[in-house]
Image (cartoon, helix red, strand yellow):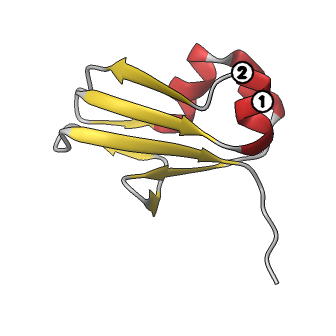
Amino acid sequence: MKLVVKYFGAIAEYLEMSEEHWELEVSSSMQVREVLESRHPGLKEFTYAVSVNRKLSDVLTDSEENVEIAVLPPFAGG
């Protein structure tokens, strides 16, 4: 499966990148947060949300083909 992982805000600054591309084998479903934190252990220190194809979700399934993952730091609105 091909993934585009996009990082925003302080997380992008910490990782010194705003985007990366992965090729990942997904057997049935997996927790995106676990994969992110195994590749970038420093993310464990951050509070963040994950979206998969523009929907807040932390689960990736093998039924999806081209996937966009966004790693979103906390944000405030008004």
Measured Cα–Cα span from mark 2 to mark 1? 5 Å
Asked whether residue 61 appears in the rendered view, the answer is: no
Three-letter code, disc 2: Glu
| Residue 69 against residue 76 in the figure, above or below | above
Label 1 belongs to which residue? 13
Circle 2 SS class: loop
- The percent position of residue 16, horizontal first and vertical second, equals 71, 21
Residue located at (60% from left, 32% from top)? 18
**Residue depicted at x 20% and y 44%:** 64
What x and y, as percent, mark residue 63?
Answer: 16, 44
Q: Quadrant of residue 42?
A: top right
Q: Residues within 10 Å of mark 1 (few under 14, many from 20)?
A: few
User: Could you tell me if the residues under marks 2 and 1 are in contact, i.e. CB atoms within 8 Å?
Assistant: yes
* Residue under the image location 23 percent in, 39 percent down: 66
Q: Residue furthest bottom?
A: 78
Q: Name the residue under label 2.
A: 16
Say what secondary structure mark 1 lies in: helix
**Residue 11, position as x, y percentages in the image:** 74, 35
Q: In this view, does 35 lie above or below 32?
A: above
Left or right of 58? Residue 63 is left
- Identify which residue, 70 or 48, lies in the foreground: 70
